[in-house]
Amino acid sequence: MGRRRIAALLLAWMAVAPVRAADALESFAVTEIAPGNFVHYGRIEERSPDNLGDQANIGFIVGGQCVAVIDPGGSLAVGRALRAAIRRITDKPVCWVIFTHVHPDHIFGAAAFREDKAVVVGHENLPRSMAQRARPYLNALKRDLGDLAAGSEAIPPTRLVVDETVLDLGGRSIRLKAWPVAHTDNDVTVLDESTGTLWLGDLLFVDHTPVVDGKITGFIEVLDRLAALEVPLFVPGHGKTAVPWPQALAPERDYLALIVRETRAAIKRRKTIEEATDEVGLTERDKWVNFDDYHRRNVTTAYTELEWE
Ligand SMILES: [Zn+2]
């Protein structure tokens, strides 16, 4: 192969390489799990230019007059793919973008809905949490996605959920509930009242190792309150399952309860935090994807919470 030919090939590759990365979301699919409730299932894998932060389950609800987005996804590219999916289904305006909580895989696509002048909605604690974390989260996004992170932005909510808020989408009400500290200190669930579909954000992990960034005992208490509800259909924050409610909550609750039990026992035996992270909860390893990425941090969080009991 001549040098000129190689140069031409290299130029051609450089021209298509960014496009190939941007095409990572070309097959962006949404599933209508209940009338008017559309879910995009994110991938259970580490963030990379190949997935552009498409890691969380996100989606939207279509009412008679308005669309409400539930989490715009992990980057502007994901938010744009979600917006394009909405536009394939309806031309009704996106009136609300609801954040289920602060984590970057759920929030960074919000700028895709700026042109819709959508009102951004979140837990009353979300503005404070977002103010503290926006910069480190954005730096990490740029580290992982490089130029493909461009335009991704943490947009603070202007409408806050204190206890409960009902939004009217036009002949369809959705009920937003702000929960006490659990997965984070700013967890919100969304209930589509006409179909009984409950969007849980990261209060429910399926397959993906549960993450505790709030309070582990609070997380269990919230799960017990959720389990008492009648929920015909639900959307986890990560993963999907055919197991019905409330049994679908059991693996996560068992995991969290085991950590609490074993961490309390370790503290009682005067184990250090390092010793506890080496031994607590390891029997759960085979039940979860990405266990090694999150488990030790969960035990650390649990230890610092439980050592003051
Ligand atoms: Zn989360």
Image (cartoon, helix red, strand yellow):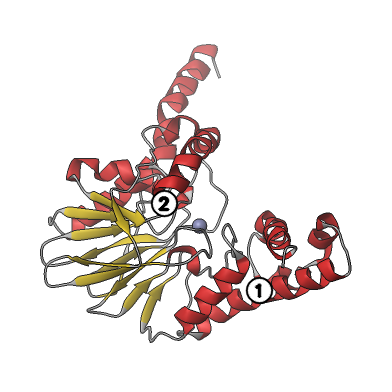
Residue at the spot 86% in from the left edge and 59% down from the top edge: 275
In the image, residue 39 above or below residue 111: below
Looking at the rendered image, the quarter that the N terminus falls into is: top right
Label 1 is placed on what type of residue? Tyr
In the image, is the residue at mark 1 within 8 Å of ligand 1 by its beta carbon? Answer: no
296 left or right, relative to 232: right
Specify which label sits upstream in the sequence, 1 or 2: 2
Q: Judging from the image, what secondary structure is the residue with disc 2 in?
A: helix
Q: Quadrant of the C terminus?
A: bottom right
In percent of width and height, residue 87 lies at 19, 53
Q: CA distance from mark 1 to mark 2?
A: 26 Å
Which residue lies under the disc numbered 1? 255
Answer few, some or many: residues within 10 Å of disc 2's Cα (few below 14, many 20 plus, some between 14 and 19).
Answer: many
Can residue 242 be spotted in the picture? no
Quadrant in the picture for residue 215: bottom right
Question: Is residue 83 found left or right of 246 in the rendered image?
Answer: left
Residue most toward the top? 4
Q: Position of residue 74 (x, y in %)?
A: 43, 47
Residue at image position (71%, 65%) is 306
Please name the residue that numbered disc 2 is placed on: 126
Q: Front-most of 45 and 181? A: 181
| Residue name at image x 74 percent, y 75 percent | 261
